[in-house]
Amino acid sequence: MTDCYQPVERKLQLTRQCLEVLAELRIPAGLITKNHMITRDIDVLQRLNEHQAVIVILSVTTLNPELSRRMEPQTSVPARRLAAIEAMAKAGIPVGVMLAPIIPGLTDHEIPSILSATASAGAQFAGYVPVRLPLAVAPLFENWLERHYPDRKDKVLNRIRSLRGGKLNDSNFHTRMRGGGIFADQIENIFRLARRKADLDKPSKSLNTSAFRRPGGQITLFS
């Protein structure tokens, strides 16, 4: 579940405790977050990486700090996310970027600049997901657009509908993560071209499961 670095993590350190267990048992893990706080746990991530058992992904929605503040107010600003990518890369931890959500008519024009900036910071691979508006999320998003970008509201919502077969959301397993139609194709083509230009079109590294070890002292069933 994301995001595993909620503000309360600073106090409770639940994610760090989970990582400690994973590192002890060498259980592979992939983490995706919008929060620079992940750099706090670089030492544990490095222990996992000794066994090729971790990848980290920073989710970057926009490079515009004002848009970021309005859309994701409790997450790290874009510059801090780039700094987290850089810190992971310098620590030798496999790190990538996820452009999510891409909002047509609002953030899709930033695809090339985001990929270029994250590649410069040290990202090694990239992916994307167009905005999804399941259930109660749709009216919340519509209200947010009305408050912050009333001049773009109709354009954005109509673009989303064009991705989702005329609706604001599509739960179909085969299309929900990419969408369909002309604007979905346009986003995919722009992304692929920009990803190749930024040299981010390499696949993410496979995680190693062979180093797993059982907890010490555990009694076996058939000893």
Image (tube, helix red, strand yellow):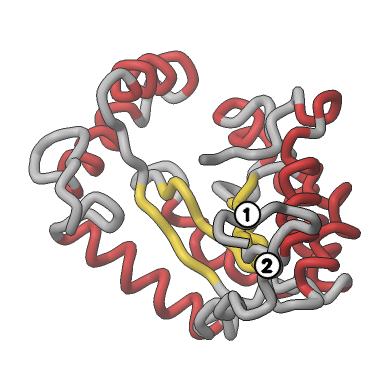
The mark found on residue 54 in the picture is: 2
Is residue 216 rendered to the left or right of residue 200?
right
Q: In the figure, 128 relative to 143: above or below?
A: below
- Asked if residue 77 shows in the view, the reply is no
Q: Position of residue 149 (x, y in %)?
A: 44, 25
Amino acid type, label 2: Val
Q: Quadrant of the C terminus?
A: bottom right
Q: Position of residue 90 (x, y in %)?
A: 87, 73
The reply to whether discs 1 and 2 touch (Cβ–Cβ < 8 Å) is yes
Q: Position of residue 65 (x, y in %)?
A: 69, 39
Is residue 154 rendered to the left or right of residue 192?
left
Amino acid type, label 1: Leu
Measure the alpha-carbon separation of dots 1 and 2.
Answer: 8 Å
Q: Secondary structure at mark 1?
A: strand
Residue, disc 1 = 31
Q: Position of residue 29 (x, y in %)?
A: 62, 60
